[in-house]
Amino acid sequence: MFHGDGDRATPLPADGESLHEAKNREHDRGCHPDSRYKAIARTLYAQLTPETREYLGIAGLTGNSRTWYGRYWRAVNRIFELTYPWEVNRKSHATAEAYQVALDSYSQKKRDRSDYLMNLLVQAPLGRLPQEIRDTYAGNVALDATLIEIAGRTNPNASSVDLPRRNLDAMAGAYRRGGNHDGQGAKTDKAGWEMETVVTVPNSPKQPQSFPILTTALALHHPGRTKHGPRIAMEFHANKFDERGLILVDRLYNGSKAHRFQKPTRQMGFRHVYDYKLKQTGRQGGVDDVILVDGRLYVKWMPEHLQTVRADFKAGLITREVHDKRLASRAQYELKDKGRPDADGRQYFFYPDLRKVMCFDPATGNRLTRTPKTPTTFLLSPDDAVSMRIIRHLNRFAYKTPEWREWYGMRSHVESNNQYVKADAETDLGNPDKHRPRGYAFQAFNAAIAFAVANMRRIVSFIQAQAMKVLDARTLQRARRRTDELGNRLPHRDL
């Protein structure tokens, strides 16, 4: 029995019963008997073969809700015993001393297991993608991080080891909206973890329905601690898919150390599409007779006013029209990609033909009377600090050109996918009250299941949309008139 209104109704205590006991009674009645745990039994019976159940040690499917609760509890905790990176009490708030002990107990082996399990779960539905659709994938992905918010107060920042933890998940971090998301304990910070998500994107901006948006890899870390998570997530994606295309990312990622993200992902065979802060634009580095300007390689004899286009535009020195014309003029000085990076991260580029363009002395700005001689190709290899500075910001497309805008616009797919999974109409991952159990391993496990469910729904929706295109086309073809008003046969329309 309840009183109150709508979803906020509370149970009325029976005689001699406290309100807390009444809530527990109604919770048990609604969640335990004949509901959650028997649903697990029914699922195992319907979805697993006898051989699979025997392999997993699920010999019998009989038992009441208490029996199934025990089985479920033991199975989940066997997993968590192997995948919790820190040994810490999750039933009470950790003191400063207990927090330090937990930090010292860190196990990379257990965290690796957790990452492996998490990605097995999210990639499992990908096997249901029909082969004819799977074969069309061009290898493009978008990568971004999203908050996995947890219930409770926000802990002090990770460096404050002398302070007790305020959240029952002692190892959780603090998330802030701005900056690199590394919260410092402000009231506006949120408690939780940050998850790197890799999603597939269409094969081309001009073909938005060419491939479904699917989550292919995950990595969980403290908010703002992005040293290794992006690389780990991309490694799991690369192990699942052989295709190598583009990685679409926001400004956080080209701000990473090149040896942590850009170099390893180029060694996988990917190229990058970046955005830049204003202070990152202009000339970004150079080696020999090649310079990097706004993410692309050009010969060093390109005039100065073409190197400062973004800064000049932002300062109001040139109009949008002049800005766009100067970006187009850069193309005649640009080196062109020759294939993709190899397993060592090396890549060749073709020099432009300088015989029909004006070249200028980089030191004086004076026009050269003779055309500089260049080799046919330029090799960019991540072997030294100078080259690594170039690799850090190297962009597949010329920054702010129409082509760049089209491709970079598809990065929004990863953000919309994260919101899709968090929506209350979908898996409701964004509701911290729906995943209250504490700790890194549970949040990784729970989020992976949520993204896996979203993958299944997206695959079904994509197949349905493709089928409806065919059915609609056939319906239109059958419904059209075959002759005109004089009885003459109409020409066939190409559908």
Image (cartoon, grey):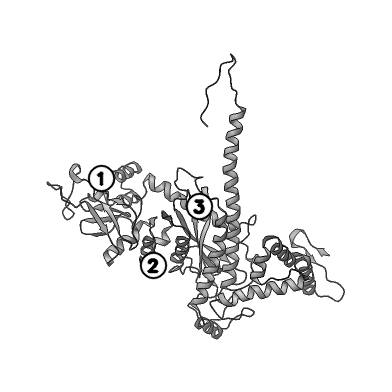
Which circle's residue, 1 or 3, is located before the other in the chain? 1
Residue for point 79% across, 62% down: 4
Please give the count of numbered marks on the rendered protein: 3
**Amino acid under label 3?**
His
Tell me, yes or no, whether the two marked residues, 3 and 2, touch with CB atoms within 8 Å. Answer: no
Mark 2 vs mark 1, foreground winner is 2
Residue picked out by circle 3: 413
**Amino acid under label 2?**
Arg
User: In x, y percent, where is residue 62?
Assistant: 77, 69
User: In x, y percent, where is residue 20?
Assistant: 77, 74
Residue picked out by circle 1: 332
Residue for point 57% across, 38% down: 470
Seen as rendered, the residue at the extreme top is 486
* Local SS, label 3: helix
Marks 1/3: CA–CA distance? 33 Å
Which circle's residue, 3 or 2, is located before the other in the chain? 2
Above or below, 52 relative to 163: above
Marks 3/2: CA–CA distance? 24 Å
Residue 282 left/right relative to 26: left
Residue 384: quadrant of the picture = bottom left
Which circle's residue, 2 or 1, is located before the other in the chain? 2
Above or below, 386 relative to 299: below
Residue picked out by circle 2: 260
**Amino acid under label 1?**
Gln
> Where is the N terminus found, in terms of image quarters?
bottom right
Tell me, yes or no, whether the two marked residues, 1 and 3, touch with CB atoms within 8 Å. Answer: no
| Label 3 neighbour load within 10 Å: few <14, some 14-19, many 20+ | many
Above or below, 350 relative to 64: above
* Local SS, label 1: helix
* Local SS, label 2: loop
